[in-house]
Amino acid sequence: MIVVAAALVWLTLPGRPLGAIERGGGGPPTVVLLHGYGSNANDWLQFEQAWTFPAATRRIYPQAPLRGPGGRRGWWWLGLEWYVPPGERLPDMTAASPNGIATAAAMVRALLKDLEQPIILGGFSQGAMTSAEIAFHTDQPLAGLVLIGGTSVNEDSWAERFASRRHLPVFIAHGRNDGVLSFAIAERFQQRLKASGIDVTWLPFEGGHDIPAEVVAGVNAFVRRVVQLQSPPERN
């Protein structure tokens, strides 16, 4: 069945797996990064020369199932304008339950089940939202979570699983001048995670809705730290 939503087309073909671009060794670890809305998996390839992950790291860049013109993709029909409060400029999705996010999360989990552990999952913008949905709405085994330029969705629902994710390292980066998703909401969300006892690395930066070099460096350091945490202690 094909459902048309504005300029994008949602393919609801039962059992259709996500496509993905793969780079690197055979792992472990496995780093899975979800692109943002209106982008596609190829956009992650610009960072391939900048990643300094451990040599064996397998990198997986899934393609979102929502298709649009010019190769644009989405994880679900976003419609940010629906979530802008009166008198505000940016959307607030902290109490929202958008249609499609659970389906997108399930499709990503179907891809993850065949990947070698440990898995570090993350994404940019809508990809970050989808990654957080998996982390805080499921029991998916994860070694680390990377959220860049995202926002919280149905946050109180996510918070019900914060205690069970207390040992999950989380990296969050957000531009102070982001004109798409609120910096203030991201900052408050990371504070709430920290207050719940979650190991959060918070990287605010002087930029917009993008992934600058300092964030790439931050992700590199985070992945290396997660790998060290996963490594068994050396015996004397």
Image (cartoon, helix red, strand yellow):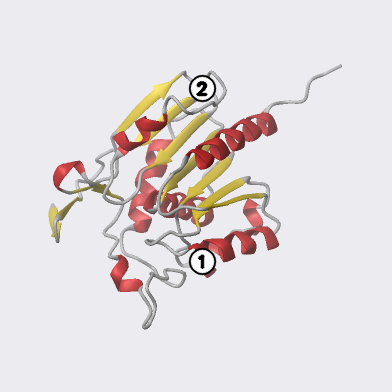
Report the residue marked by disc 1: 185
| SS for dot 1 | helix
Instruction: From the image, tell me which residue sits under label 2.
Output: 27
Q: Secondary structure at mark 2?
A: loop
Residue in the picture at 27% in, 65% down: 79
Residue 179, placed above or below residue 31: below
Image location (x, y in percent) of residue 228: 68, 29
Report the residue that reaches farthest toward the right.
Answer: 236
Q: Disc 2 residue type?
A: Gly
Q: Are marks 1 and 2 in contact (CB under 8 Å)?
A: no
Three-letter code, disc 1:
Ile
For residue 232, above or below residue 194: above
Q: Mark 1 to mark 2: distance in Å? A: 34 Å
Disc with the residue nearer the chain's start (1 vs 2): 2
Q: Position of residue 148 (x, y in %)?
A: 47, 49
Displayed quadrant of residue 52: top right
Q: Is residue 93 left or right of residue 138?
A: left
